[in-house]
Amino acid sequence: PLTARINNQDNLEIGGCDVQKLVQQFGSPLYILDETTLRAACRQYRDSFKRYYKGESQVLYASKAWSCLAVCAIANQEGLGIDVVSGGELHTALNAGVNPSKIYLHGNNKSREELAFAIEAKATIVVDNWHELKTLVEMGSLKQPIRIMLRLTPGIECHTHEYIRTGHLDSKFGFDPNQLDEVFTFVSKQNGLNFIGVHAHIGSQIFERQPHRDLAAVMVQWLIQSASHGLNITELNVGGGLGVKYIESDDPPSIEEWVKPICEVIQNACIEQNLPLPKLLSEPGRSLVATSCVTAYTVGSSKEIPEIRNYIAVDGGMSDNPRPITYQSVYRAVIANKMSVACTETVTVAGKHCESGDIVIKNAQLPKTESGDILVVMATGAYNYSMASNYNRLPRPAAVLVADSEANIILQRETYQDLLRQDCLPERLKNS
Ligand code: LLP
């Protein structure tokens, strides 16, 4: 939960900072990241693995959830490595000071340039498919073997939105496990590749724990299979995946409750098979950043359609949070300057984009609002900024990091000038 409280002015305070004042100072919309909560989540993951797993473990932050220098630097300070999925995320992690030995590059279609960048930086590459594997064989050398893991599709179904499910066999990610022997045989002959382990990811925003238990069991089988090819798996990465509480009815397990069975299944199976414990990797994204952040908007216009619906509109929307329109995601909101006023109204919070589907929250329970109120949407740290766009040429919001009553900018608000930075006007289009 956030380090939040209601102050003497009945205003919401996060990290000791009055949200209304933050908006006055930094503008609106504004992402507000609570450093204490983010650090606590990093520690819970790290400590839970240390507690329940007897072998070595390493938590990686899946930076696709929110890639920027400050968030990567905090994860790094908390001892986490970083999972990146593009040259851009790799560049960000490196610039945040992360040691490349703790950076893992994912992706189902990495370009040759991205692969070369990762090799040069000495990051580990999580190989997704045959095409990539063969490209790496071309790029590898005996002098500097490329550290690789193999991503496999585990064939495990779980209950989450179809777009963010990745474990089923008909997925664009990873090697088909039915070809495992073939892949292992191929890899075992490559001296330019330093094979260190296997990876699997079954999906995101998952609350059930059984799929990850099943995954852990399947992965130990792969470990046994690799040994029969003379390969030595030293690292096993169970992917990301713990879901978070967006609304009251969401009831995810705690990080500790989620980590424990994964550790136990792998540990027990290895002991039973007389195998050395591999280094256990996990790469959460959402559950590290989602609930550490809120988005503050300013309420502007409103519209009442008698007996049908009351709308209020805010100064952002699908450009800073595309999740509702993309996945029908639901969020909860409060009015930062009316924290002690009863929620007597049912209103639909609309964004300001030219699209009727641009709805932030349908039927939110709020106090009576008026123009100028500060509406705060909770749990927006994951996949909001990272999927933000400039749709309708809205400049992307600023982000501030709050802790101990201090607020620091971590992402500057884009300006109109920024919007034109990449625009070019050919000479013949210029008015004479
Ligand atoms: N590892 C791999 C290989 C992944 O594909 C993902 C997420 C993660 C780790 C991190 O999973 P997490 O701990 O965040 O659940 N944009 C979507 C989510 C896409 C997730 C993609 N992969 C959303 O807004 O819900």
Image (spheres, helix red, strand yellow):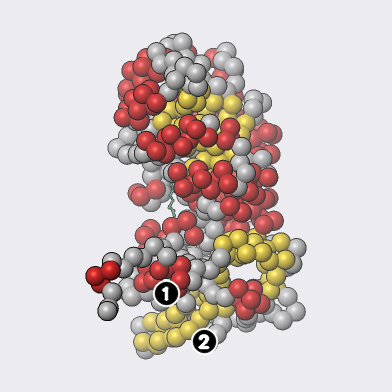
x then y, percent, for residue 162: 35, 49
Disc 2 residue lies near ligand 1 with CB under 8 A: no
Amino acid under disc 2? Ser
Distance in Å between CA atoms under marks 2 and 1: 14 Å
Nearest the camera: 283 or 418?
418
Quarter assignment of residue 137: top left
x then y, percent, for residue 358: 37, 71
| In the image: residue 297, left or right of residue 52 | left
Please determine whether, in this image, residue 34 is positioned above or below residue 194: below
* Residue tagged 2: 371
First in residue order: circle 2 vs circle 1: 1
Dots 2, 1 in contact, CB < 8 A: no
Mark 2 closeness class: few <14, some 14–19, many ≥20 residues within 10 Å: few
x then y, percent, for residue 242: 52, 46
Nearest the camera: 367 or 167?
167
Which dot marks residue 351?
A: 1
In the picture as drawn, the residue positioned furthest to the front comes out as 432
Residue at image point 39% right, 26% down: 139
Nearest the camera: 124 or 161?
124
Q: Quadrant of the N terminus?
A: bottom right
Q: Quadrant of the C terminus?
A: bottom left
